[in-house]
Image (spheres, grey):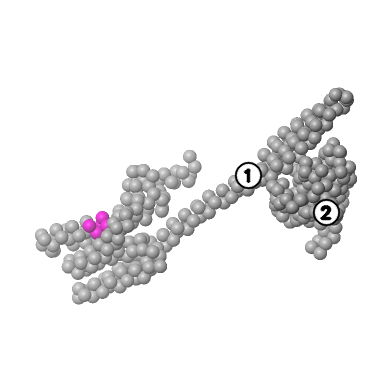
Amino acid sequence: MSADAEDAGRVPRVGQPPEGRREFYVKLLWIAMWLAFLGSPVADLAQGNHGAAGTTLGCLGLAVFVVAYIGLVMRQTGRPLGRFAARACLTVLPVLAVVLSLTLGPEWLVLFVYVSVALGAVLPLRHSRIAVVAATAVMVGVGLLRHTDPQYWLVVPALLGGFSMIGVRELVRTTRELREARAQVAQLAANEERLRLARDLHDLLGHSLSLITLKSELAGRMLPDHPDKAADQVADIEKVSRQAMVDVREAVTGYRRPRLTAELAGAQVALTAAGIEATVPAEAPVLPEAREAALAWSLREAVTNVVRHSGARRCAVDVTRRETLDGPVVELTVEDDGAGPAGAPAGNGLTGLAERLVAVGGSLDAGAAAGRGFRLVARVPAGSVGSAA
């Protein structure tokens, strides 16, 4: 068991409802400890200074006062009273404090300290500060009406107790907000991870399955007249399938880092297999890992769309380092002479690419090419100058 868990088992959780009878009694004990300051009224009753009737009424009033006070404070620790009961208790406390102090003597002025604490614990924050000051002022006024020492030393405990309870409420509220914020951050992180996994799986499986479909159709056409070539295509299908499984495992674990040069070679194979005349460079500029991965994903998605949707006869891929006003960038261009976007909105693939590129400070432009076809341009800030085979 962790230290936090052990502490939670010993100390009542502020602002949280008790989870069982034991924790309820622990909270009750914490509150009852502060009732020790009622020693003056209890001693006044024990000395028998008020006769049988006065002592009986004093005991009854003090008992009602304590029950109402505990009910209100326990309301703030997770065992709420109903609205009517809370209002009744909040009315009873100051009334009893005034009546008992006026009738039984200045020893009972300490009740106003508990009234101040209860007001700070229950009233809305915009009213509680004024109420605490007002309760303290009433205490001083009642002491003056008794024509006795108004016990000004109680002013400090009354103000301190009330404002301390207000501070505790603010602390509890802040703690709850932090707990909710932490839960929200965890939820957002989980959503972001699901989104990343969805993007990776879409890009991985869309490309691989498209290639498998094309090679399967090609093998089917070759099988009657060219069984040897059909066997080669089946072997390629097996390789692509195995690589797709590896890619999916790596994507799920978050370790996949596609390389732009490898994707250029894969694009050449996929376009050629689809019967599309391809112009693909063999080299790519050196980039930081995250930016290279973003361009590699962009190339894979673009080639997959060309193969599956464009009906193109030619496709040109270019990777160029350019100087811009914002600094050097590496620009990937994929352009085909197919049917073009045909007014269709961007799909999940292009949306995912845009998110990937923005995450590394890049941008994505996609739309109709000059004349006929579709053109995709992905840009990322350039890293070190150079090229890798």
- Please state which of residues 279 and 125 is positioned toward the viewer in this rendering: 279
Give, as a three-letter code, the residue at label 2: Ala
Q: Which residues are magenta?
A: 64-68
Residue 194: assigned label: 1
Residue at 41 percent across and 44 percent down: it is 9
Residue at 37 percent across and 55 percent down: it is 76
Residue 74 belongs to the span the image colors magenta? no
Q: Quadrant of residue 380?
A: bottom right
Give, as a three-letter code, the residue at label 1: Arg
Residue at 32 percent across and 50 percent down: it is 29
- When the figure is inspected, residue 83 is found, relative to residue 127, above or below; the finding is above
Residue 67 belongs to the span the image colors magenta? yes
> Which percent across, then down, holds residue 239?
79, 31
- Which residue is the site of mark 2? 369
> Which percent across, then down, holds residue 137?
30, 73
Q: CA distance from mark 1 to mark 2?
A: 33 Å
Q: Quadrant of residue 238?
A: top right
For discs 1 and 2, the disc positioned in front in the rendered view: 2
Figure quadrant of the C terminus: top right
Residue 250: assigned label: none
Q: Could one spot residue 164 in this view of the protein?
A: no
> Which percent across, then down, holds residue 234?
81, 28
| Secondary structure category for the residue under label 2 | loop
